Amino acid sequence: MVLPVFYTLLTDHWGRMAGRGRGRGIAAFTFNIEALGLSRGALPETALGPIPLFPPVEYKPVPLKSGEDEEYMLALKQEIRATMKNLPYNIPVPEEKPDVERYKEKYTQKVYKNKHNTWTPDWQRLPKELMPQKKKKTKPKVTKQVKATSKKEKEDLLSKLDELEKKDQKSDDETGEKAADEGEDEEGGEGVEGGEFDEEEAEEENDYIASYFEDGDDFGGGSDDNMDEATY
Amino acid sequence: MTAQEVRLCGLLLQEHFGEVVEKVGTHLLRIGPLSLRAIAHETSTPLDLVKKSLCVLLQHSLCSFEGTQKGPRGVVEYRASCERILRMLRYPRYIYTAKTLYGDTGELIVEEVLQRGHMTMSHAVQTVADRLTHNMEEGSSMEYSEVVSAFSRLVETHLLQRCPSVTEGPLPVASSGGPAASATVPTLSECQTERFNLPPITLKGKGKRRLSNEDNEAEQARGKRARLDDANTKTSGDEGIYWQVNFERFHQYFRDQAIIGAVASKLDQTSSEIVRTMLRMSEVTTTPTAAYTQPLSVNEIFRALPPSYSISRPVLEQYLTLLVDDPMEFVSKTGDSGGGMYAVYVHKVLTSLARATLESVVQERFGSRSARIFRLLLRKRHLEQKQVEDFAMIPAKEAKEMLYMLLSENLVQLQEIPKTPDHAPSRTFYLYTVNPLSTARMLLQHCYKTVANLIVRRLNETKENKRLLEKSQRIEAILASLQASGAEAAQLTEVEEMITAPERQQLEALRHHVNKLDSSENQVDETIFLLESHISSTMASR
């Protein structure tokens, strides 16, 4: 702690440490110290560091008031704290779900979802944006996109494949045919962007990827025609 | 919004509403008004949680919204109110005051309204009646009409007030903001004339007793009954009219109590009764920040005195003269009509009380001699070091040490008065002074920091002993269920012995500590109230 008075006295008004010209270590003042009524020994000790975190207290604090009023208010305070925890206004931190959904989670009930735990505010008094929005299903959006772009995609795909056909050798005809068939029949598979498609799902509700097995094309028979193509 | 205030607000929000609301609330306090998306983005909280927290904050009037014209379509900005959050510290005092004034019914009404932020009158009456019925003996129940009458009495004395109601009508829309802004943000306007008007409601019935048998059965039965209740009490005529606690009025009451207490301790009981009468008569006519109450004539005071204090007219006048002449200036004479017009000088009393608080703080921390120096400086404003030593009659060395101690704690300031244009230290006067207003503010911040520390310490203590607390709670639950199903005494003692004696001692010590910390919070809040009233009264009178 720097005592402001004596700091100003120790430096002259340009801020330099006074008395330095006399040699190191002699703290001399530029003024006549007796004139101010001070003596060298009367100066308090210089502080050697920051004050400790819990400094020793000279005077112990006065004890708290304790009476009927205070005890009642204490009880009230603790009661309020306890009840507020159970009111619906207390929003708990949502628990993080583990990576894998455990089987038991389906069967452990969240307790006490009775009327007292839910609360709906008066929406007329609040801005509309605070109302919880219902989540729309994403599927319809995606199918709409597909339907809107499907024709275009189909044409692009076909034209691209035609080009490829012309460029590459005959051995790729089959794959090209297959792809073209795919494009016509199912509008989907690996070539086109996008996730699941409604039509594909509507056709087959199983896990088999339909593109590998086509009713029209023989899997085994096709490759017999041309031995150049390697079968894996 | 100082750092200490924000910290304390955060702790209070966390205690009452959980961590999610605390995060949102402290962020709003630190940054200022923000829109919904900005809050969600900056606190990295999911949007629906932010929405829920804002709903909770708005329900309790801890936050307000405002439709602004920023952005392409106008954006709603939310602003948290630090002052209002700090009021949560004072809830026990409000409830206790309601109890002393209006009994158990009043107490429960105020408690319910405080816990829920704001509610309709019918809802309040029903919940309070149910709670009272629950505590009454078997067979009797609380009539709604009694609760309604208690409610109306609370409203008549302005302790409860109506919330601002939604007005129909478009917002003044600027050309850039679209009409969408006015549709999404309701305008809430306060109608001064209707603030304390009770709505006409039709509520007949009595409180329902909740049976607490087996938990499951009761829950099912409650569920059914709740549905039936919903069907029965759907409309009771006061939809949309919400009531909230009028903190200003409570503060006025606390202030009056402080003034009466001060008069009683300085003078005597009769003068405090006179001042109490004067304050009671000017309750509804005085604004909260007025420096003086309305002038009252001696005749009015005489007529309004409580019959138990039957003093004669000349004695009353003598008492009033005594109050006016007292150096504390409790009461001042403002005129001579009607036998003499007298008004209570509220501002001066608050200043004296705040000053007494400051002095007692100095005395308890630094000793009575430092307190003497402090009081001297308060009275004489500016003093040199030599003069301080002389007036306080303390030896020079000790006086110096004490002064520097007070200076380092910032309770006392140094004022330089240069004699020459270059501020040469040997030719400058250094005067010590105390600035009461800034010292009061500093002490107020210390108080906020104190309460925050107390809360943190209490949370820490409970966290350290969490295992023990949980164990004791489980054992209590077992005991309760055993007793309810009629177990023998031997079984009960067996269960009780599951907690060992040292654990019991530890629990007892923990309970004692927590009680002490809680009680300290309540009492520091009293000091906060005094200092806040003083500061607001001084700022209003400037």
Image (cartoon, rainbow, N blue to C red):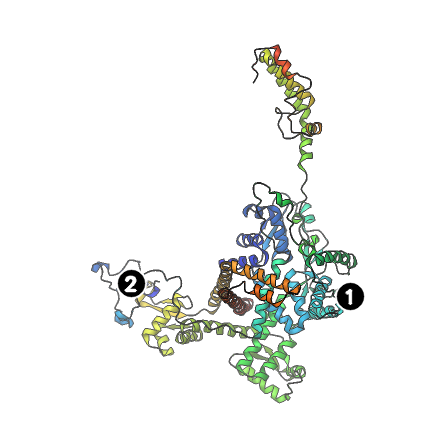
Give above or below for B47 relative to B3: above
| Chain letter of the residue carrying label 1 | B
Q: Quadrant of residue B18?
A: bottom right
Asked if badges 2 and 1 are on one and the same chain, I answer: no
Give above or below for B419 relative to B43: below
Q: Residue at x 29, y 63 (%)?
A: A10
| Chain letter of the residue carrying label 2 | A
* Residue A172 in the image, given as x and y percentages of width and height: 59, 14
Q: Quadrant location of the C terminus of chain B? A: bottom right
Q: Is residue B254 left or right of residue B123?
A: left
Q: Which residue is mark 1?
A: B205
Query: Is the residue under label 1 in contact with that under label 2 (CB below 8 Å)?
Result: no
* Residue A23 in the image, given as x and y percentages of width and height: 20, 59
Give above or below for A55 relative to A126: below
How would you rate the neighbour count of disc 1 (Cα within 10 Å): few for under 14, some for 14-19, many for 20 or more?
few
Q: Which residue is mark 2?
A: A10
- Kind of residue sitting beneath label 2: Leu
Res. B327 in view: yes
- Kind of residue sitting beneath label 1: Gly
Q: Looking at this view, is B29 or B14 the one in front?
A: B14
Q: Quadrant of residue A90?
A: bottom right
Q: Count how many numbered circles sit on residues in the image.
A: 2
